[in-house]
Amino acid sequence: MEGHGRFTPIGRQYGIGIVGLGEGKGLVKGLAGHPELKVVAVCDANEQLAETIARQYAVPHFYSSLEAMLAREDIDFVAIYTPDQMHFTHIRQSFEAGKHVLCTKPLVNSMEEAREVLAYVRANPERQLMVGQSSRFFGPMQHQREAYEAGKLGTLSFAETQYVHDMRWFYNERAWAREGGFDLLFACCSHPVDLIRWYMGDVEEVSAYSSQSDIAIASGFDGHDTFVINLKFRSGKIGRVLGLYGLEHLHQTRPWIEVALYGTKGTFIGKYPQLEAQIKYEGEKERTEHYFEDIYHYFQFEGVNHHAGEFVNYTEHFARNLHQGTRAMPDAEDGFQTIATLEAIRQSIRTGSPVRVEGRS
């Protein structure tokens, strides 16, 4: 897992169209020079930005219209990084154009949209949709998953996940977040909710509280940005999620994303962006593992605020599964259940009561 340009083999070439270059530029940068995954075109409502990114990274074509980009026959799949409230429309357009879809989290912004997306996917089994849950593809979380699947943790007793991040930059710089239809619960807590479901399975019931931080109020952000969530899983086990976005963060010593798994044979706590883990296995001394060799892969462009490495990781995962004819995860079914969990959390916050999570029909 070393170094810059750490590309893993796919088995064939794929042409990619990327829409939404606020976050999507990370994938453009990360895939520069990839021998099998070629960014054929980029698209953004800001045509000047699209042209600048295309020229800077030798992308052959740029567009301000998604419809125009989707008409290209050399695009095999579309990577969607547009504002959350536009995901549903752009997924639908891409499917109707016959493209596979890789969509950043959250998949969509409501249960109604999630049901429709699931219907599209079920009606078109020849096309795949994967949710770009980047936090599954951080180095420490990949090592953690390997340990879990190898049985080193035994049976999980409890899990807690968090996404804690100073979001003042976002409150001040993302004007589209003030235009309505935006919810930090879906935008940010989709990370820790997806991560805890990855290990503990589908959620049966949630009980949640939220509040608005003083930092959000001072920044003029109209919405809650502090979330404490308790979850009961269908297995009968329980877990906990923390989302906190209005704070002065200890960036060096405290993780933004943390996944703590407590099992009968071991405990593994993965941390990002520190790229390290605290580990204790049965019969062994506890230790800290540092994944220093991963640093340039993840932070080669703009430090810890850049998402190139994990975007490359999950795009390779998606393309490799397309080539092999297998299902890339998290898929639409799994993404639907994360949205259903988030919607139940939203309802629990509104009502002040526990809420059951809608299952897949």
Image: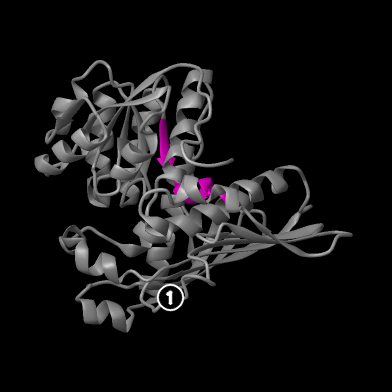
Answer with left or right where residue 248 lies relative to residue 321.
left
What residue is shown at x 16% (from left), y 31% (from top)? 62
Whole-percent x, y for residue 336 in the image: 43, 44
Q: How many marks?
A: 1
Whole-percent x, y for residue 193 in the image: 49, 57
Res. 44 in view: yes
What residue is shown at x 42% (from left), y 36% (from top)? 130
Report which residue position mark 1 lands on: 249
Res. 24 in view: no
Q: Is residue 136 magenta?
A: yes
Answer with left or right where residue 32 lies relative to residue 330.
left
Q: Amino acid at mark 1?
A: His
Q: Residue furthest right?
A: 283
The front one of 126 and 118 is 126
Q: Is residue 291 above or below residue 17?
A: below
User: Please, which colouring scheme is shown?
Assistant: one colour
Q: Is residue 292 magenta?
A: no
Span of residues in magenta: 129-139
What residue is shown at x 21% (from left), y 19% (from top)? 72
The front one of 23 and 66 is 23
Picture quadrant where residue 35 is located: top left
Q: Is residue 315 above or below residue 142?
A: above
What residue is shown at x 49% (from left), y 40% (from top)? 330
Q: Quadrant of the N terminus?
A: top right
Whole-percent x, y for residue 89 in the image: 22, 39
Q: Residues within 10 Å of mark 1 (few under 14, many from 20)?
A: some
Secondary element type, mark 1: loop
Picture quadrant where residue 64 is located: top left
